[in-house]
Image (cartoon, grey):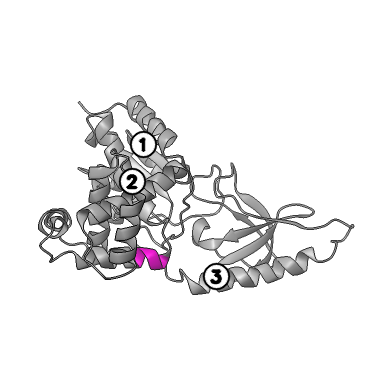
Amino acid sequence: MSLDKATAESAVKEFLTEFKGLEQIKIRVLHDRADFVQAYGSAADEAIEAWQGMKAAFMPNRREIHVATESHYSTGDLKTSLAHEGIGHAGINTCTREEKRALLDAVIGSKDTDSTLGRAYWPEIQERYPDASIDLQAEEVYCLAVERSWRRRDLNKTAYEHAWQNSVMGDKEPLQAWGLAQVGQHIAQGLRENTRQIQIIPAADDELFRAGDGQDVAQSRKAMEGVTTTLQAKPLPGGLNAVVKDADPHAGKPYTGKVIEVTQHHALQQIGANKFVVHELGKAGPLQLEKGKSATIGYPGMQAQSVALSRPSGKELAKGPER
């Protein structure tokens, strides 16, 4: 018999208690049609059909993990799905773009080697996901390594550093299964300690990288810092000093107020007499903001959002990295 919703939600809570860093990801338990409506809106019926046989999926743009109770028959299996999606797909996005690219390339380089990765991991993933891109297959190989090692808590810092420096960031030796497992253990430990943050937020849920990750995002941030520095340099009308903070994607409700400035990847919004927030637009979803006009900016998972967020439809609902 598959899990009931209460049991599944309890298992999710236990998992998050251990991996506190995954609280930056919203986890949805899909049990009945109401859950699908909440997650997918008017596309709920298509989503239900698309989810037949699926266990879980990570939606990187929305920063959500969805798990289906119908496909899980024990809490242990459900937690393994959470590890696959959370430490695996979400965890790899706590790397920088350059680190993730290097890790995927190292995994791809192991595909045709006479090693455990080449002989066992790659054939299993290619059978599971025959139509996936080589990059997605490589990410799934990493997630498979996470599935098989996450419970062990056997992080060896010396072994991790050796694998990371010699097989991932360098090419002195091919990546081995033990080395990939140590990378997973390193990421898992960071999520336990809540020291790792999502750094890669693709523009769509079926993408592994975001166009613009890297230098142009940093340049956009730098340009916005110039704006906020100027804003804070002198008192506002009425004598108040401007207080500027980064927007919190997990705040209870959307931000409403006048848009002061927009750069390529950021927006500055006034939400009070002297209160301002800086939004990273890739986290908030597709928006059309106009400088000088009021806007309501919400993030995935917020209640009562008045800004439409990106939402795939039909069969594309199931295109996110899945287990």
Q: Amino acid at mark 2?
A: Leu
Report helix, strand or loop for mark 1.
Answer: strand
SS assignment for the magenta stretch, majority? helix
- Count the labels in the image: 3
Q: Which mark is residue 156?
A: none
Residue under the point 41% across and 62% down: 202
Residue 142, given in percent of the width and then of the height, sits at: 26, 54
Residue 14, given in percent of the width and then of the height, sits at: 39, 30
Q: Residue 174 lies in what quarter of the image? A: bottom left
Give the residue furthest to the right. 238
Give the alpha-carbon distance from disc 1 to disc 2, as whole Å: 30 Å
Q: Earlier in the sequence, mark 1 or mark 3?
A: 1
Q: Residue 16 lies in what quarter of the image? A: top left
Q: Nearer the viewer, mark 2 or mark 3?
A: 2
Residue under the point 29% across and 48% down: 46
Residue under the point 33% across and 30% down: 8
Q: Amino acid at mark 3?
A: Ala
Q: Amino acid at mark 1?
A: Val
Report helix, strand or loop for mark 2.
Answer: loop
Q: Nearer the viewer, mark 1 or mark 3?
A: 3
Give the residue furthest to the front. 158
Q: Which mark is residue 29?
A: 1
Q: Is residue 133 visible?
A: no
Q: Is residue 180 magenta?
A: no
Pointer 1 local density, CA inside 10 Å: few below 14, some 14–19, many at least 20 = many
Give the alpha-carbon distance from disc 2 to disc 3, as whole Å: 32 Å
Range drawn in magenta? 97-101
Residue 77 drawn above or below residue 220: above
Q: Residue 121 lies in what quarter of the image? A: bottom left
Q: Earlier in the sequence, mark 1 or mark 2?
A: 1
Q: Which mark is residue 155?
A: 2
